[in-house]
C-alpha cells in the first residue's frame, strides 16, 4: 500500500512538471529550464515505475498467499466433515468452492492491491491538483464523477444476482461432468450416450445463458465510461480555450488539467474494473464462508483420552441415529456387544441400517442418542488418532488412491515392511494377482482403483486394513464381489489372522456369517434378534426369511 501511494503521488506530480516546462520553458524559450525539469520528470518517472513494480510484486505474493491459506482452510474443514456435511454440500460443489471460488477471491485481492489502492488516491489527488490549477474549469468534474458513479452502481446492482446464478450453474456442470466420467461404464452399458449428451448440453446451455447475460451488462460498462470521458474532454478544451483567450489560465495549465481529468477518469475506470469483479468475488466469498462456518457434527473432544487398555472390547449401548429433519431415525435403541477373539455378524434387509451402525464406531458420524464404547470409553471422548489405530474399517465401497499397490497398503501404516505387505496380501487372497502384475507392489493403481476389478479392489482394501493391525476389524459387506471359493478361503485365513481381535462383519450372504459367534439381526433400524445361526433359525422369523431366500431348508440346517 505504501508503494502504491508513492507511485500514485509520482504520477500526480508529472502533469504539474509538464505544465511548468510548457509555460516557463517552451513558451519563454528557456532551454536550461526545460532540461532541468525534464531531468526531474525522468527521476519522478523512475520512482513511479520502481514503486509500481514493487507494489505489483508484493500484491501478487499477498494474493497468492491468501489463496493458499483459504484453500488450506477449506480443505481442513472438509476433512473434519462427517458424511452428513459432505452430503449436504455435495462433492462437486465442494470442489468448485475450493478451486474456482477461491480463484475469484484471489483475483479480486490481486486487483485490489494493484488497482483499488491507487484508484481513490488518484481520484482525490487529481481533483485537488485540478482545483489548484483552475477552480472555474473544475466545475466540469462536478458533473462527470457523479454520472460515472451512478452508471457503474446501476450495472453492478444487476450483476450480483447473475454471478450467484453463474456459480451455482458451474456447480451443476461440474456435478454432471463428474457423474459422466465416474459412471462411464454404466452409460455405455445402457447405451445412454445420447441422453447424457443432452443432459450435459442442458447444463452447459444454462451456464452459457447466464454468462452471456453478465457479459452483456459488462459490455455496457466501458462504452459508458469512455463516452463520459470523451464528452468531458471536449467540455474541458472548449471552456479552457475561452479561459486562455480571456487570460484566466495558461496553455500549460490546460494541458495539465486535461492530464488530471484523464487520471481522474482512469481511476474511475480502474474502480469500474474492480466493481466488475466484486459481485462475483463476493458471491464466491459467501460460498466459501458457508463451508468454513459449517461445523462438523463429529466434534473432536476437548480433553481426549489418549491411551486405552487396547483389548478391543466394543459395546453399542442404546445407540440411535437420525438425519436432521428426517421423519424417522435410521437406527433406534441399538444394543450390541462384540468381544475380542469373537466374530459378530450383522445382517438385515437393504436399508435396515447395517452400514450406518458400523459407521458409528470409527465416527464417520456420531450417534444422536446412546453411546458407542471402545474398551469402556465413549468413542466421542477418544483421541481421533487413537481411534483410527484401534478401529479398522473396510467400507462397503472400497476406495483406492492413485499411486501404487504399496502406497495404498501403507495408508494405515506408513512404516510397514514389504514382508508385512505381502503377508497381508496373502491373507486377503490378493497375493496371487499382485505377483502377476509387472511391477508387483510397485504396480500403478488408478484413482479409485478403476484399473483393477471389483473383487481385487475389495481384497486390496482388506489387505490395507490388515497392514494397520487394529484391535477391532469392521467389514462392511466387504466380501460381496468375491466368488464363493475366494470368500471361503479369505474367511478361513482371516479367522487365523484376527483370532485375538474383535471382528464385526456386515454381510448380505448368509454363507459369510453363519459361523459367526453372534449374529445380530436388524430390521428397520432395530435389533430384532441376536444369537447363533441355529438359534435364530429356530425362533427368529426375520432371520429365517433372509436365510431361506438364499438357501434351501436342508442347506440352512
Image (cartoon, helix red, strand yellow):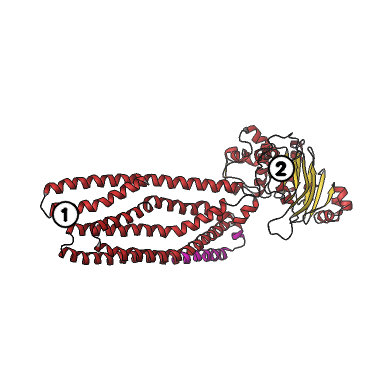
Query: Picture coordinates of residue 89 (x, y %)?
Result: 59, 56
Identify the element where label 2 is drawn.
helix
Q: Residue at x 48, y 57 (%)?
A: 282
Q: Which residues are magenta?
A: 186-212
Name the residue beneath numbered marker 1. 22
Say if mark 1 contacts mark 2, CB within 8 Å.
Answer: no
Q: Is residue 16 above or below residue 214?
A: above
Q: Identify whether 492 is placed above or below 535.
A: above
Left or right: 52 in relation to 177: left
Instruction: Identify which residue, 81 or 62, lies in the foreground.
Output: 62
Q: Where is residue 444, by image quadrant? A: top right
Return the residue found at the far right: 538
Residue 204 covered by magenta stretch: yes
Asked if residue 205 lies in the magenta stretch, the reply is: yes
Q: Position of residue 23 (x, y in %)?
A: 15, 55
Badge 2 crowding class, 10 Å Cα cut-off, few under 14, some 14 to 19, many 20 or more, is many
Q: How many marks?
A: 2
Q: Dot 1 lies on which element?
A: helix
Mark 1 or 2: the one toward you: 1
**Main secondary structure of the magenta stretch:** helix
Q: Is residue 480 left or right of residue 276?
A: right
Q: Which mark is residue 379?
A: 2
Q: CA distance from mark 1 to mark 2?
A: 82 Å
Res. 71 in view: yes
Residue furthest to the left in view is: 29
- Residue 226 seen: no
Residue 496 lies in quadrant:
top right
Q: Position of residue 154 (x, y in %)?
A: 42, 66
Mark 1 closeness class: few <14, some 14–19, many ≥20 residues within 10 Å: many
Amino acid at each position: 500500500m505504501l508503494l502504491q501511494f508513492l507511485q500514485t503521488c509520482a504520477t500526480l506530480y508529472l502533469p504539474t512538471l509538464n505544465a511548468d516546462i510548457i509555460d516557463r520553458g517552451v513558451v519563454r524559450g528557456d532551454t536550461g529550464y526545460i532540461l532541468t525539469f525534464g531531468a526531474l520528470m525522468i527521476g519522478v518517472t523512475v520512482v513511479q515505475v520502481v514503486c509500481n513494480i514493487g507494489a505489483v510484486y508484493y500484491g501478487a505474493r499477498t494474493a497468492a498467499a491468501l489463496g493458499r491459506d483459504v484453500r488450506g482452510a477449506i480443505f481442513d474443514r472438509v476433512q473434519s466433515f462427517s458424511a452428513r456435511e459432505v452430503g449436504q454440500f455435495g462433492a462437486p460443489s465442494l470442489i468448485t468452492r475450493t478451486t474456482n471460488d477461491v480463484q475469484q477471491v484471489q483475483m479480486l485481492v490481486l486487483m485490489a492491491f494493484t488497482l483499488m489502492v491507487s484508484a481513490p488516491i488518484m481520484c482525490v489527488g487529481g481533483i485537488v491538483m485540478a482545483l489548484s490549477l483552475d477552480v472555474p474549469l473544475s466545475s466540469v468534474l462536478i458533473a462527470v464523477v457523479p454520472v460515472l458513479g451512478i452508471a457503474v452502481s446501476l450495472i453492478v446492482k444487476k450483476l450480483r444476482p447473475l454471478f450467484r446464478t453463474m456459480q451455482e450453474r458451474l456447480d451443476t456442470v461440474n456435478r454432471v461432468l463428474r457423474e459422466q466420467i465416474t459412471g462411464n461404464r454404466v452409460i455405455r452399458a445402457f447405451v445412454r450416450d445420447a441422453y447424457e449428451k443432452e443432459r450435459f448440453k442442458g447444463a452447459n446451455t444454462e451456464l452459457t445463458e447466464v454468462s452471456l447475460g453478465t457479459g452483456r451488462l459488462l459490455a455496457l460498462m466501458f462504452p459508458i465510461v469512455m463516452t463520459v470521458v470523451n464528452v468531458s474532454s471536449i467540455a474541458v478544451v472548449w471552456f479552457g480555450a475561452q479561459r486562455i483567450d480571456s487570460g484566466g489560465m495558461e496553455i500549460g495549465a490546460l494541458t495539465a488539467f486535461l492530464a488530471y481529468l484523464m487520471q481522474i477518469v482512469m481511476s474511475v475506470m480502474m474502480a469500474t474494473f474492480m466493481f466488475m469483479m466484486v459481485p462475483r468475488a463476493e458471491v464466491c466469498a459467501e460460498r466459501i464462508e458457508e463451508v468454513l462456518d459449517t461445523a462438523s457434527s463429529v466434534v473432536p473432544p476437548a480433553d481426549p483420552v489418549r491411551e486405552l487398555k487396547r483389548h478391543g472390547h466394543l459395546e453399542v449401548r442404546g445407540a440411535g441415529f437420525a438425519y436432521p429433519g428426517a421423519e424417522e431415525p435410521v437406527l433406534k435403541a441399538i444394543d450390541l456387544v462384540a468381544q475380542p477373539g469373537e466374530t459378530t455378524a450383522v445382517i438385515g434387509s437393504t436399508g435396515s441400517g447395517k452400514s450406518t451402525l458400523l459407521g458409528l464406531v470409527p465416527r464417520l458420524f456420531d450417534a444422536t442418542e446412546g453411546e458407542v464404547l471402545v474398551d469402556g470409553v465413549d468413542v466421542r471422548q477418544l483421541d481421533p488418532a487413537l481411534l483410527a489405530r484401534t478401529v479398522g474399517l473396510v467400507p462397503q465401497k472400497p476406495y483406492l488412491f492413485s499411486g501404487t499397490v504399496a502406497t495404498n497398503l501403507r495408508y494405515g501404516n506408513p512404516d510397514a515392511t514389504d514382508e508385512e505387505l505381502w503377508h497381508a496380501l496373502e491373507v486377503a487372497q490378493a497375493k496371487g494377482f499382485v505377483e502377476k502384475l509387472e511391477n508387483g507392489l510397485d504396480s500403478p493403481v488408478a484413482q479409485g482403483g478403476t484399473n483393477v476389478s471389483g473383487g481385487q479392489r475389495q481384497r486390496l482394501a482388506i489387505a490395507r486394513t490388515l497392514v494397520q493391525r487394529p484391535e477391532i476389524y469392521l467389514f462392511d459387506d466387504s466380501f460381496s464381489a468375491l466368488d464363493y471359493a475366494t470368500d471361503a478361503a479369505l474367511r478361513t485365513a482371516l479367522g487365523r489372522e484376527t483370532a485375538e481381535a474383535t471382528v464385526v462383519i456386515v454381510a448380505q450372504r448368509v454363507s459369510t456369517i453363519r459361523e459367526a459367534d453372534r449374529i445380530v439381526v436388524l430390521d428397520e433400524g432395530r435389533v430384532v434378534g441376536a444369537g447363533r445361526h441355529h438359534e435364530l433359525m429356530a425362533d427368529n422369523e426375520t432371520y429365517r426369511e433372509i436365510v431361506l431366500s438364499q438357501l434351501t431348508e436342508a442347506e440352512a440346517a
